[in-house]
Structures are given as structure tokens and as C-alpha cells.
Image: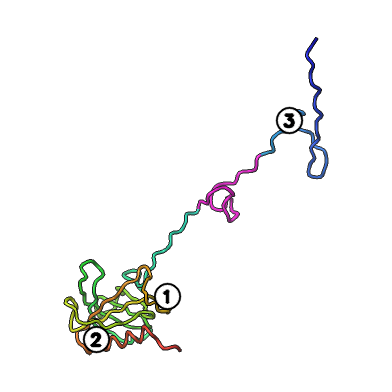
Amino acid sequence: PPPLRSPPRPVRPRLGENGASVPADNGGIDGARPPPCPRRSRGVGGGGSGAPALGEASAQPCRAVPRVHAFGKGGQALRRDPRAPPAMRGWLRKQDSSGLRLWKRRWFVLVDLCLYYYRDSSEQRVRGGLPLPGYEIRVLPPAPRAPGRGAYRGSGSLHHGHPRPQAEHPGMRTYCLGAETPEELNAWVCALRRGASPLPR
């Protein structure tokens, strides 16, 4: 006798959006895979939606944390307002930040609670500058490498005008300066201390 064949399974109608029956397109056999989800294009926002597609890494690179600088130097020096009158200006010696720690003669200008220095007294191009609020100005005893009869050092940490005695800000620098005479030294120390600790308005 011929082998028995199982009876065909009934075709289940599929419902459309409005509930109407939709004929099956798989030859009468149910269980076909659902259509795949449309792929989103790779890139920032996955097609302009403002966010990367789910499961995809954003094509936008991570931004590196900017390095903290407590002072400006060269092309990144603080900008000076030419209309602001300087509180003090004159020649000082500044200890270099390089490994040799050489003393260099620079023209300094104190204006608007900031100390700027130039290569010469023409004040054409700012070589560097630092905001004074939050710095501690201390007078140091004469050292073998210090010029003149004394030097003073400004150290501290600037955080929106609030002093931090630990000075644990990354990128902070201690400035060592020297004056030619004790009178100049005292005048600069007083002026810098007024700039570092301004009176509340």
C-alpha cells in the first residue's frame, strides 16, 4: 500500500493594518521570518537623528580632556586690555622654566590683576602672563643663583579666585622673580600682593 501522507495544514490568514485578511506570500506555508529591520546608516546620529544607532559605536571621536594651564605663554598668553592703566611696570628677572633654570631679564606690567611680561619695554608682544588672584606672594632669602639682593616667588593655585594652599592643580607653575634693588623688590611685592588678594568691591 502507498505510504500515508499527513494532511496539509490549514493556511492561517495574516491581518493587515486595518484588520483585513492578507494572503500569505510563502506558498501557503506559515512561519516565515519577519522582514528584517531597516539598517541605519553608520555615522554620527545614524541618519541625522542626533544619536548613534542602537548597537553601533558613534563615529564621533571622544574628545580628550584639555590640559590645564595656569598661565599663558607665547601665542596662548593672556590678552591684555590696552585701555586699562597699568598699576606698575618695570624690569625684573624671571627664572626660566627649562632645565637650566636660567635667569632672564624681562619687562613686566601689572594691570587688571594680571601680570604680563615682554621681551622689552616696547610692550609689542606679550610673552606670557598669569592671573594673580589666588597666588601667594612670598619673599625668599637671597640664594646663590638669585639675582640682586633678594627675590620673591609667587606660588599658589587659581580656581576662580579662590586660593588653594596645596597648589595641586595640574599644570601649575611657580614663578621666581628677582629685582635689581631692595626698593624695587618691596614695591613689586606690595603691588603683587594687592593683585593676588584684591579688596572686595
Amino acid bearing label 2: Leu
Callout 1 secondary element: strand
What stretch of residues is rendered in magenta? 36-59
Residue in view at x 21 percent, y 77 percent? 105
How far apart, in angstroms, are the residues tagged by discs 1 and 2? Answer: 27 Å
Q: Quadrant of residue 156 in the image?
A: bottom left
Residue 161's x, y, as percent?
42, 79
Q: Residues within 10 Å of mark 1 (few under 14, many from 20)?
A: few
Q: Residue furthest top?
A: 1
How far across and down, in percent of the image, does residue 174 sit?
30, 74
Give the residue number, with chain letter if any, for mark 2.
185
Relative horizontal placement of residue 91, taking residue 36 as reference (left or right) = left
Q: CA distance from mark 1 to mark 3?
A: 71 Å
Q: Which mark is residue 26?
A: 3
Query: Nearer the observer, disc 1 or disc 3?
Result: 1
Which corner quadrant of the image does residue 173 belong to?
bottom left
Q: In the depicted view, which residue is nearer to us: 149 or 96?
A: 149
Rounded to the nearest whole Å, what is the CA distance between mark 2 and mark 3?
95 Å
Q: Earlier in the sequence, mark 1 or mark 3?
A: 3
